Amino acid sequence: MAVQYKKIGIIGGGISGIAAAKQLSQFEPVVFEATDSIGGVWKHCSYRSTKLQTPRCDYEFSDFPWTQRDNTSFPSYREILDYLYSYATYFDVLKFVKFNSKVVEIRYVGDSESSAGAEYGSLLPGRPVWEVGVQTTQSETIQWYAFEFVVICTGKYGDIPAIPKFPQNRGPEIFKGKVLHTIDYCKLNEEESTQLLKGKKVVIFGYKKSAIDLAVECAEANQGPEGEPCTMVVRTLHWTVPHYSVWGLPFYMFYSTRASQYLHERPNQGFLRTLLCHMLSPMRSAVKIIESYLTWKLPLEKYGLRPDHPFEEDYASCQMAILPENFFSEADKGKIAIKRSTSKWWFWEGGVQFEDGSRLDADVVVLATGFDGKQKLKAIIPDPFRSLLEFPSGMMPLYRGTINPLIPNMAFVGYIESVSNLHTAEIRCKWLSRLVEDQFRLPSVDKMLEQTMKEMEIMRRTTRFYKRSCISTFSINHSDEICEEMGWRSWRKKSWIAEAFSPLQ
Ligand SMILES: Cc1cc2nc3c(=O)[nH]c(=O)nc-3n(C[C@H](O)[C@H](O)[C@H](O)COP(=O)(O)OP(=O)(O)OC[C@H]3O[C@@H](n4cnc5c(N)ncnc54)[C@H](O)[C@@H]3O)c2cc1C
Ligand SMILES: NC(=O)c1ccc[n+]([C@@H]2O[C@H](COP(=O)([O-])OP(=O)(O)OC[C@H]3O[C@@H](n4cnc5c(N)ncnc54)[C@H](OP(=O)(O)O)[C@@H]3O)[C@@H](O)[C@H]2O)c1
């Protein structure tokens, strides 16, 4: 079958893919979306109680305000999907999307020299660089498309669950009850999810947002005397927050203003700034008041849930979960139980067993163990580029969070995170659009690698969870550098006081 040729292909129709399609719409891109809808995780990875964790006004496209932008409530996943549909409809980008079209293979058809040059090269060289193989739900045959430039937006979460490995004959196959991952739980409707949990001994593995929200849904399904408690198995402790204020101070003051981020390391800071940053470092420990607030506000000591690592390490790795209001009240009622265990575990026919021999009886085991987003990339990116995805430290080296200097004519959107991943994706798509239009040029491959190494080094020094590729402690600097490269002013407010002390991203 003939290969169809277009300039730009985008893979994925979540927040990142739709932002990319909007910003690159002048090139009439083709967007491949594996499922029958846009929205990504908000469509396929949400429970009935899932809400945005980011304040609404921060999770907003710069040219498309929420209708109720001053509403301080956190929108539900349905509201987010509606908002995204309105955006895609308003800017007429749905016409670019090919639904039920899963990219199953990508082939490099560019010059062999351009994959290893000192300069990155033109993003639109006038001839195909990548061929993309697409499987639709209507046909077994793979349809091939050729592109000069491909934007990968397949998402870090969703689609591929991270499933623990078990010793032989001790996996889910020997368990008499039901085992599922949260991604399967998301497919159930309200009635089905309540039936799954009601009156059952449920064990949840994980202590992050998916696990915490599920524990509360489980407790809600088990109200009354017949209700069973649900047990969370917690491996690593993390800081959770009940709301966005600390001792009456808005949370953004601690990390999201220029003044607060001034205390944190950033790439390319000169000697004077490094010195100043060092001298001001005792002020960083002022954020210890967040830890003291959380320990006072939440019964962390009572439930053995106070982490040993600093709060900052969770913030700097974008792992801070907002606690549902009734989490600890359900724990107090005995509907949520906590088991700390860092040991290996496996199944027996009546439940799960830990290395020390202790057992938990279970009817249902839910793996809230996260996702394997890298697998989605490795499945489609061909060698030798696959081996460069995480070169050299297990993190993705992405210049401006977008271009891997060693992979030609390909961009990655949605792989670095910050406080609002919508904003993080959108500004990078604007940058990409101007780059494709040749409004500015990329530095040499070596310079780009040097910059990405500096950023990765900062993440490594800031948090032990650095592999999550989160820039939240230097996000303003990251945006500033992007703006400067595009020839924009990096200061964004009317006065220097607002610039220094109001929230920025
Ligand atoms: C439950 C949940 C809640 C979250 N809450 C927040 C929050 O409050 N604030 C925040 O900032 N971030 C949040 N996040 C992070 C969230 O991932 C981002 O905000 C954002 O929605 C990611 O969008 P994306 O387009 O990059 O990825 P995704 O939403 O994962 O979209 C990827 C899309 O690519 C498609 N796709 C994948 N592989 C292929 C393929 N081979 N071919 C074709 N299509 C493919 C998928 O079907 C999907 O539609 C949350 C994540 C989850 C899972
Ligand atoms: N807005 C929302 O309401 C919302 C809701 C859900 C998810 N999210 C987002 O979606 C993303 C994914 O969240 P997630 O909670 O699904 O996944 P996650 O953040 O990757 O957390 C996975 C959890 O499973 C644990 N785990 C993994 N393997 C395990 C094993 N073998 N045994 C025991 N425990 C194991 C992990 O423990 P360790 O820490 O020890 O590895 C961790 O607690 C995050 O960015 C999150 O913020 C947001």
Image (tube, grey):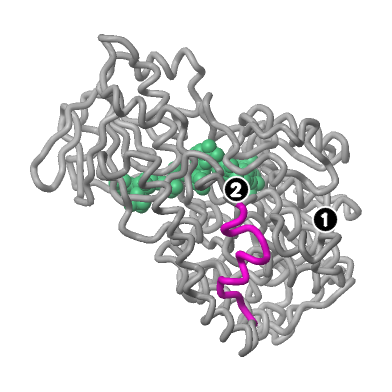
| Residue topped by disc 1 | 5
Residue 195's place in the image compared with 34, above or below, is above
| Number of marks present in the image shown | 2
Q: Residue at x 34, y 32 (%)?
A: 366
Residue at image coords 28%, 14%: 227
Specify whether 356 is left or right of 175. Answer: left
Numbered disc 2: secondary structure: strand
- Say which of 43 and 150 sits in front: 43
Q: Quadrant of residue 147?
A: bottom right
Question: Disc 1 versus disc 2: distance between alpha carbons?
Answer: 51 Å
Q: Residue furthest top?
A: 225
Give the answer, above or below, for where 477 lies relative to 135.
Answer: below
* Earlier residue among tags 1 and 2: 1
Q: Give the quadrant of residue 360.
A: top left
The answer to whether residue 177 is above or below residue 225 is below
Residue 261 shown in magenta: yes
Judging depth in this view, the residue of 19 and 501 nearest the camera is 501
Residue 164 in view: no
**6 inside magenta stretch:** no
The foreground one among 115 and 441 is 441
Q: Position of residue 418 (x, y in %)?
A: 60, 56
Residue type highlighted by circle 2: Pro
Asked if one can make out residue 90 in the rendered structure from this viewpoint, the answer is yes
* Outermost residue to the bottom: 271
Task: Tell me which segment is drawn in magenta.
Answer: 252-268
Residue where numbered disc 2 is placed: 250
Three-letter code for the amino acid on which mark 1 is drawn? Tyr
Within 10 Å of disc 1 (Cα), the crowding (few <14, some 14-19, many 20+) is: some
Q: Locate residue 231 relative to residue 379 in the image: left or right.
A: left
Q: Position of residue 478 (x, y in %)?
A: 68, 68
